[in-house]
């Protein structure tokens, strides 16, 4: 898989190292320009709408600066029985979240938006993945907290890191839980003509 043009046409409007990793693993050439929008300006709405709206705002923010580029914005939340679990601010926060998730199913929602302002093209949607945690003992929770991995992570865990031992089963996209539904993103970029899947013929 390769980009149509030699210089990256794609900009990831996120500072998330996990999203950068996923796009690199997919072999996509891109640059990174994190959005600086104030997330508090996004109006309250149902979770599925909120993450999509926020991803659109991030993409629009960078698209205003680079109108000829294809901008990818994204936002991920963890949802347990209708309550959004954000990033823990303390060990107590992390402990409380992990106990809430222990032995239970929760949802990970990622809203993503892809736009190119110059040609007035925009697409966005929300992808949902169900995640089942194993029953966690107090010792397991305390061990995981002391690794410091829960901090800076929605829901207080990272499925791609040490937190993989917490997860018993998922229903849906794995990369969505990491932070970006790669299948859907690439599918759109191929349809938009940004990525090329043609096979080069060997010289004879």
Image (cartoon, grey):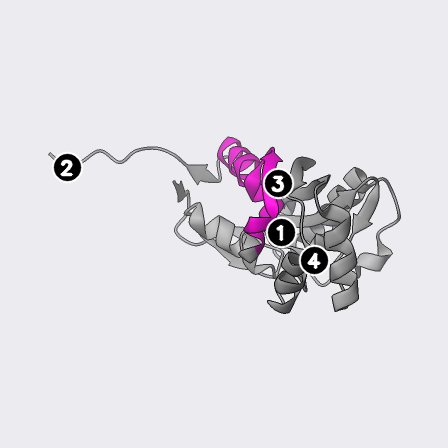
Q: Main secondary structure of the magenta part?
A: helix
* Gap in angstroms between the C-alphas marked 2 and 4: 62 Å
Crowdedness near tag 3: few (<14), some (14–19) or many (≥20) residues, C-alpha within 10 Å: few
The residue to which callout 2 is attached is: 203
Secondary element at image label 3: helix
* Gap in angstroms between the C-alphas marked 4 and 1: 51 Å
Q: Which mark is drawn over residue 119?
A: 3
Q: Nearer the viewer, mark 2 or mark 4?
A: 4
Crowdedness near tag 1: few (<14), some (14–19) or many (≥20) residues, C-alpha within 10 Å: some
N-term mark: 3 or 2: 3
Magenta stretch containing residue 177, yes or no? yes
N-term mark: 3 or 1: 1
Q: Nearer the viewer, mark 3 or mark 2?
A: 2
* Gap in angstroms between the C-alphas marked 3 and 4: 54 Å
Q: Which residues are magenta?
A: 163-192
The residue to which callout 1 is attached is: 67
The residue to which callout 4 is attached is: 138
């Amino acid at each position: 898989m390769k980009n149509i043009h030699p210089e990256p046409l794609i900009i990831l409007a996120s500072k998330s190292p996990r999203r950068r990793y996923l796009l690199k693993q997919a072999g996509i050439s891109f640059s990174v320009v994190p959005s600086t929008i104030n997330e508090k300006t996004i109006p309250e709405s149902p979770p599925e709408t909120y993450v999509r709206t926020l991803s659109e705002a991030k993409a629009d923010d960078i698209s205003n600066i680079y109108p000829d580029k294809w901008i990818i914005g994204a936002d991920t939340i963890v949802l347990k029985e209708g309550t959004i679990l954000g990033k823990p601010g303390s060990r107590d926060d992390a402990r409380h979240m992990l106990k809430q998730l222990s032995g239970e199913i929760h949802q990970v929602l990622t809203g993503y938006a892809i736009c190119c302002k110059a040609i007035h093209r925009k697409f966005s949607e929300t992808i949902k993945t169900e995640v089942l945690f194993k029953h966690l003992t107090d010792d397991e929770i305390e061990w995981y907290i002391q690794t410091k991995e829960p901090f800076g992570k929605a829901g207080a865990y990272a499925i791609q890191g040490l937190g993989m031992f917490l997860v018993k089963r998922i229903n849906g996209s794995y990369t969505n839980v990491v932070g970006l539904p790669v299948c859907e993103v690439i599918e759109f970029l191929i349809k938009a003509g940004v990525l090329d899947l043609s096979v080069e013929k060997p010289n004879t």
